[in-house]
Image (cartoon, rainbow, N blue to C red):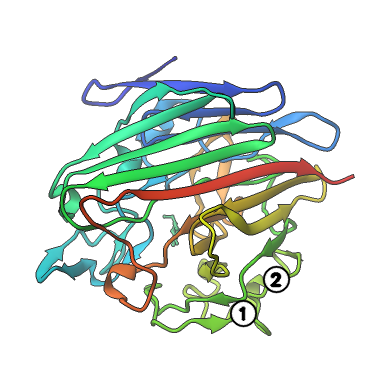
């Protein structure tokens, strides 16, 4: 359905995927998940992601609500990298570093879309050609992300090919609040992260290269714990108290299979909604909306404030292109990049 036009006149379409229980809304601008209605424990469906009611809200600027992020999600230190003996300079859009693909990342372009519904459920496939040199990256990159509504949630399948070696790291940047985007902070949500290690970063959140255990720190979510329980005690909090909160890459257990593995479970006590995240990625950024500062008026006119949502961005580790010891993010010609993340929903009694 028609969802308006970008300032240069490009038409933007919104697709609604529904199965009688869950409804997902996705649009061609940024291949963004704009809405996700899931039942609470009484069976009543409600939206669990932050965003806007109209395209205008998204065009006015926002911190990646629901967006498909690329070519390289998360940070690249010093906004530069070398590959095959060549130096590449990128836009520094986060202090001295590159964040989420640069000035005009995949979240700000209009994708092509086609309905590809099949036996797994109703689905939309978004495709985009990121040209050689776009945002400073090498190679023409053909990228696709398919949103499939499955019986109890939504599955995101990414793929890409290139004609020159390039770093790639795709994620979805949905901001979840399982009680609804208008229901205050997520500090009472209980989180379990299937990660016993994380990658500490410097003041600009660029990994030091170390991989540290979470045990004995406020980053230990290996058993379900309210997000707010230790949020003021994060060691080396990149932004201690100001704004403060979690914004860390967690290391998921290595796996031999290419099947998505359990990464996280989040439970919201009042509605009973439970979200479980599965992914093929080696890492997950847990971010508590620290930089939501009230400047975005979202769905139904609700002002989005600090800690009003959490993100669980499945990914390769930040700055991997400059860290040969991390799992590689380099895609070469002839190879196909693939990544799958599933968000599944249930309720507690
Ligand atoms: C980053 C945060 C950033 C947020 C929104 C997250 O992936 O780690 O530092 O503020 O995205 O841009």
Mark 1 Cβ and ligand 1 under 8 Å apart: no
**Residue extending furthest right?**
349
Q: CA distance from mark 2 to mark 1?
A: 9 Å
**Residue extending furthest left?**
86
- Mark identifier at residue 214: 1
Q: Judging from the image, what secondary structure is the residue with disc 1 in?
A: loop
For ligand 1, which image quadrant applies?
bottom left
Height in image: 249 above or below 46?
A: below
Q: Earlier in the sequence, mark 2 or mark 1?
A: 1
Mark 2 vs 1: CB contact within 8 A = yes
**Mark 2 sits on what residue?**
222
Q: Can I make out residue 171 in this image?
A: no
Height in image: 178 above or below 206?
A: above
Which residue occupies 22% across, 57% down? 166
Quadrant in which the N terminus appears: top left
Q: Can I make out residue 200 in this image?
A: yes
Which of the pair 274/334 is nearer the observer?
Answer: 334
Label 2 environment density (alpha carbons within 10 Å; few <14, some 14–19, many ≥20): some
Label 1 environment density (alpha carbons within 10 Å; few <14, some 14–19, many ≥20): some
Q: Judging from the image, what secondary structure is the residue with disc 2 in?
A: loop
Quadrant in which the C terminus appears: top right
Residue 118's x, y, as percent?
53, 23
Which of the pair 38/113 is nearer the observer?
Answer: 113
Horizontal relation, residue 289 to residue 330: left or right? right
Which residue occupies 81% across, 51% down? 269
Residue 132's x, y, as percent?
13, 47
Which residue occupies 56% across, 67% down? 252
């Amino acid at each position: 359905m028609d969802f308006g036009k970008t300032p240069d006149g490009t038409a933007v379409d919104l697709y609604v995927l529904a199965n009688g229980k869950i409804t997902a809304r996705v649009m061609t601008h940024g291949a963004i998940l704009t809405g996700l209605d899931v039942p609470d424990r009484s069976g009543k469906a409600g939206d669990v992601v932050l965003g806007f009611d109209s395209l205008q809200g998204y065009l006015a600027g926002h911190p990646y609500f629901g967006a498909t992020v690329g070519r390289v999600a998360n940070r690249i230190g010093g906004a530069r990298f070398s590959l095959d003996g060549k130096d590449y300079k990128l836009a520094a859009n986060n202090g001295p570093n590159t964040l989420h693909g640069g000035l005009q990342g995949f979240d700000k372009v209009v994708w092509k879309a086609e309905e590809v519904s099949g036996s797994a459920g109703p689905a939309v496939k978004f495709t985009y050609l990121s040209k050689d040199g776009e945002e400073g990256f090498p190679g023409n990159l053909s990228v696709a992300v398919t949103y499939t509504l499955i019986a109890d949630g939504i599955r995101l399948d990414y793929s890409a090919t290139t004609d020159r070696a390039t770093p790639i790291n795709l994620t979805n940047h949905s901001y979840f609040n399982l009680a609804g985007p208008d229901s205050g902070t997520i500090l009472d949500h209980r989180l379990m992260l299937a990660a016993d290690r994380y990658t500490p970063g410097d003041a600009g959140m660029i990994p030091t290269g170390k991989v540290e255990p979470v045990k004995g720190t406020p980053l230990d979510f290996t058993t379900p714990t309210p997000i707010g329980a230790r949020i003021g005690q994060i060691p080396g909090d990149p932004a201690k108290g100001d704004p403060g909160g979690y914004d860390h890459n967690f290391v998921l257990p290595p796996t031999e299979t290419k099947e998505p593995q359990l990464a996280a479970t989040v439970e919201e006590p009042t509605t009973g909604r439970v979200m479980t995240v599965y992914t093929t990625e080696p890492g997950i950024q847990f971010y508590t909306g620290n930089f939501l500062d009230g400047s975005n008026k979202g769905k139904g006119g609700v002002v989005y404030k600090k800690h009003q949502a959490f993100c669980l961005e499945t990914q390769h580790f930040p700055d991997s292109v400059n860290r040969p010891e991390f799992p590689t993010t380099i895609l070469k010609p002839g190879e196909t990049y693939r990544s799958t993340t599933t968000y599944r929903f249930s309720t507690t009694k």
